[in-house]
């Protein structure tokens, strides 16, 4: 019997899912152990020229009420109507595989519970790191470890922009436009530039690794809109690359500290060499020491690859995979205040500031760049105020 799947959304990722499915149908079926076909594609737009024109529907109920459809790929993005659609599918026992970071970061605990209650699966490998396998390794291959820290470059668009700024001296706005053309950026690229997308991804990783739902509102998040070409050039002189780093660690108090910040990453650190749209995730555990996962973090086929990997898993697993879940959190008392974050720091300050950094140099346009000894975020903020700093970032 052929397993019927439905794809919700025919944007960059959804169209990639259909394209890759038909390109590799034979081998996908071999891995799934059964024949498969796409029965529906849900989208409100018309695609009369599409080779799959006969599969389109504008009515979600066609999918929901069709008992033949047992596996659904959700590639719509946003919380609604995605949440309502995914919830309804899971309540009917249809497994869902999603690329929707916002949905998992905001509603993951609820959807995982519903999936377990209905003996099906809510999978989200594509929601973090694009093509990179990271969700399944975290709860399967690395399950024997006590993981105490995860850090990574989790947004392809900002990494692409920062790379263009560094390699080609390309202004921010031009690099962003290019990222949009290449299909990397979110519908509203503010989510990329201001760090919200990376925040959602570190929320998902934090929830999975530490077992309680971490909401985006609980995570200190700063994007790259204040990073200037002079910071990228100064970082280079200081032996660092500027990267948007998302991380979570267990602190001495036993709480966890998730955070997203543009960061000066030393050229000795592997993350400094992660460029363009590539993402990297470094996982630290007592058995593995450190393991790095690396690959394309955004784009049509890389993300489609992760969605389809989940669809194949969903077709193979007739019962809920319990290890890929977490509990709801009543409050965020298990999350440490960002003020306690300890780091070395970089400051961009006016030329006449009182320089008391570890390393400093003056630029001929009236700006100085300094790095400091280890300070907490609260101390760095106070210092930034005292120096009238124009920008400051942690140094790794
Ligand atoms: N806009 C996201 C990024 C897409 O640039 O990483 C992949 O999640």
Image (tube, rainbow, N blue to C red):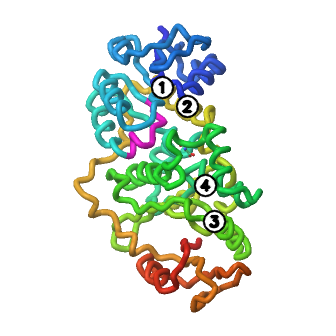
Taking the spot 60% from the left edge, 87% from the top edge, the residue there is 357
Q: Which quadrant, please, contains the C terminus?
A: bottom right
Question: Which of the two labelled residues, at mark 2 and mark 3, occupies the earlier sequence position?
Answer: 2
Q: Are marks 1 and 2 in contact (CB under 8 Å)?
A: yes
Mark 4 crowd level (few <14, some 14–19, many ≥20, 10 Å Cα)? some
Question: Which of the two labelled residues, at mark 4 and mark 2, occupies the earlier sequence position?
Answer: 2
Mark 2 crowd level (few <14, some 14–19, many ≥20, 10 Å Cα)? many
Question: Which of the two labelled residues, at mark 3 and mark 1, occupies the earlier sequence position?
Answer: 1
Range of residues picked out in magenta: 97-105
Q: Quadrant of residue 210?
A: bottom left
Q: How many marks?
A: 4
Where 269 falls versus 294 (above or below)?
A: below
For label 4, the residue is 292
For label 3, the residue is 228
For label 1, the residue is 9
For label 2, the residue is 13
């Amino acid at each position: 019997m052929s397993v019927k799947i439905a794809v919700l959304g025919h944007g960059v990722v959804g169209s990639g899912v259909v394209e890759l499915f038909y390109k590799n149908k034979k081998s996908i079926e071999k891995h799934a152990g059964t024949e498969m076909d796409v029965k529906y594609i849900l989208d409100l737009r018309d695609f009369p020229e599409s080779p799959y024109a006969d599969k389109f529907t504008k009515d979600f109920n066609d999918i929901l009420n069709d008992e033949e459809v047992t596996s659904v790929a959700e590639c719509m993005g946003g919380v609604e109507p995605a949440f309502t659609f995914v919830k309804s599918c899971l309540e009917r026992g249809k497994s869902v595989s999603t690329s929707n970071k916002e949905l998992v970061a905001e509603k993951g605990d609820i959807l995982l519970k519903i999936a377990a209650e209905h003996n099906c699966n809510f999978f989200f490998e594509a929601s973090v790191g694009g093509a990179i396998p990271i969700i399944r390794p975290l709860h399967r291959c690395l399950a024997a470890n006590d993981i105490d820290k995860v850090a990574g470059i989790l947004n392809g668009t900002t990494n692409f922009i920062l790379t263009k700024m560094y390699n080609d001296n390309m202004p921010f706005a031009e690099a962003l436009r290019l990222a949009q053309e290449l299909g990397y950026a979110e519908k509203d690229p503010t989510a990329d530039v201001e760090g919200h997308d990376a925040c959602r991804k570190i929320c998902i990783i934090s929830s999975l690794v530490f077992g309680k739902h971490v909401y985006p509102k609980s995570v200190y998040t700063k994007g790259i809109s204040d990073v200037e070409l002079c910071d990228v050039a100064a970082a280079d002189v200081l032996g660092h690359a500027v990267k948007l780093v998302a991380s979570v660690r267990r602190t001495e108090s036993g709480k966890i500290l998730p955070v997203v910040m543009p960061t000066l990453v030393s050229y000795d650190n592997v993350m400094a060499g992660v460029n363009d749209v590539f993402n990297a995730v470094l996982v630290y555990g007592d058995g593995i020491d450190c393991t790095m996962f690396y690959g394309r973090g955004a784009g049509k086929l890389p993300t489609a690859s992760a969605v389809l990997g989940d669809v194949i898993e969903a077709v193979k697993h007739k019962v809920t995979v319990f290890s890929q879940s977490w509990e709801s959190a009543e409050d965020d008392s298990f999350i440490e205040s960002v003020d306690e974050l300890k780091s070395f720091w970089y400051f961009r300050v006016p030329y006449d500031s009182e320089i008391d950094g570890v390393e400093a140099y003056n630029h001929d346009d009236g700006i100085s760049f300094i790095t400091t000894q280890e300070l907490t975020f609260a101390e760095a903020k106070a210092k930034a105020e005292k120096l009238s700093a124009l920008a400051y970032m942690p140094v790794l």
